Amino acid sequence: MSLGVTDTPVDGVQQVVVAFTGVTLMGPDGQQSFQFATEQSVNLLTLQGNASQALLSNVTVPAGQYQWLRLDIDTAHSYVISSTGGQYPLNIPSGDQSGLKLVSGFTVAQGGLSDFTIDFNLRQSLTEDNASGTTTYTLTPALRLVNAEEVGSISGTALNTMTIGGESITNANCDPAVYVYPGSTTVFNGFDVTISGGTTPITSGTLTLNSTTGFYDYTIGFLAPGTYVVAATCAGNDTSSSVSLAFSVPQTVDVTANSTTTVNFS
């Protein structure tokens, strides 16, 4: 079995470093723990699109159904580097005691390699707190486990003349991004903006300016095969204080395993 981590991006910080000390599984033979000889400090913001970093590589585990897995964390060595360069503690509730637990079950097949990836949705789970004049960040992860052997991706571009709700994506406050929703979605929530009857995004990808073409590029990886709806938005407006969030015209896309589907915005 192999296990890696990837990240859905977040704006306003340069690094989000999590120090992993091991992985624990609960499966057919009970609890099995893999503790690392050396702590693995991972900057999650480097793991976007189709990028991931391995935590376990080809370890032997019993075949069968697993109830949960836990990422063991050293919170003392986990931190955030803000957009202005300051380093701040990363608070992970119960991180030292119970780690980061993912309770969605999964199956390890008999006689083959099982390769899983955990997606950290930082846009949804990282919050900044300035209470009492002291800045801290809290990670309450929205973790998504995918079978890395059975996933596809979506990528494409957006024109630099594109506007969303009247706002240009070149605006410094826009932070353009593409949000991914289940294929039946008709009313769109943000990660922090909630609309009555709306659906929360599964994941997202940052639209990044390509200095060569002048367009904005994005890639969103580790998607299970199926039908999705994608729409571009100004993620800088996706805040808990906002009551609405504008989107581009949504597009429906079919994702197949081991392939990339192109969706462009204009």
Image (cartoon, grey):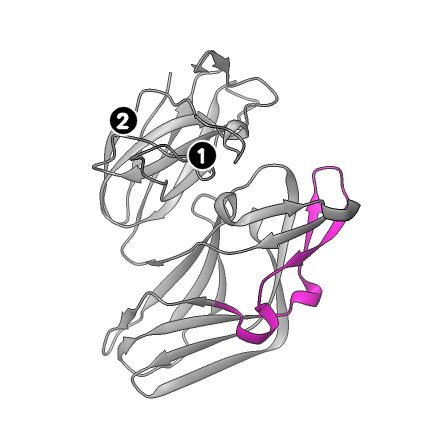
**Which residue is disc 1 drawn over?**
193
Residue at 36 percent across and 41 percent down: it is 200
Residue type beneath disc 2: Gln
Disc sitting over residue 251 in the figure: 2
Closer to the eye: label 2 or 1: 1
Density class for disc 2 (Cα within 10 Å; few <14, some 14-19, many ≥20) is some
Q: Earlier in the sequence, mark 2 or mark 1?
A: 1
Assign a secondary structure to mark 1: loop
Name which quarter of the figure residue 156 lies in.
top left
Residue 47 rendering spot, x and y as whole percentages: 52, 49
Residue at 52 percent across and 47 percent down: it is 122
Residue 230 magenta-highlighted = no
Residue type beneath disc 1: Val
Tell me, yes or no, whether the two marked residues, 2 and 1, touch with CB atoms within 8 Å: no
Q: How many marks?
A: 2
Residue 81 rendering spot, x and y as whole percentages: 70, 47
Residue 46 shows up from this direction: no
Q: Is residue 116 left or right of residue 136?
A: left
Residue 218 shows up from this direction: yes
Please say if 105 is above or below 10. below
Name which quarter of the figure residue 66 lies in.
bottom left
Q: Which residues are magenta?
A: 73-100
Density class for disc 1 (Cα within 10 Å; few <14, some 14-19, many ≥20) is some
Going by the picture, which residue comes out furthest to the bottom?
Answer: 29
Residue 195 rendering spot, x and y as whole percentages: 37, 32
Residue at 31 percent across and 20 percent down: it is 249
Name which quarter of the figure residue 265 lies in.
top left
Please say if 20 is above or below 5. below
Q: Quadrant of the C terminus?
A: top left
Q: Quadrant of the N terminus?
A: bottom left
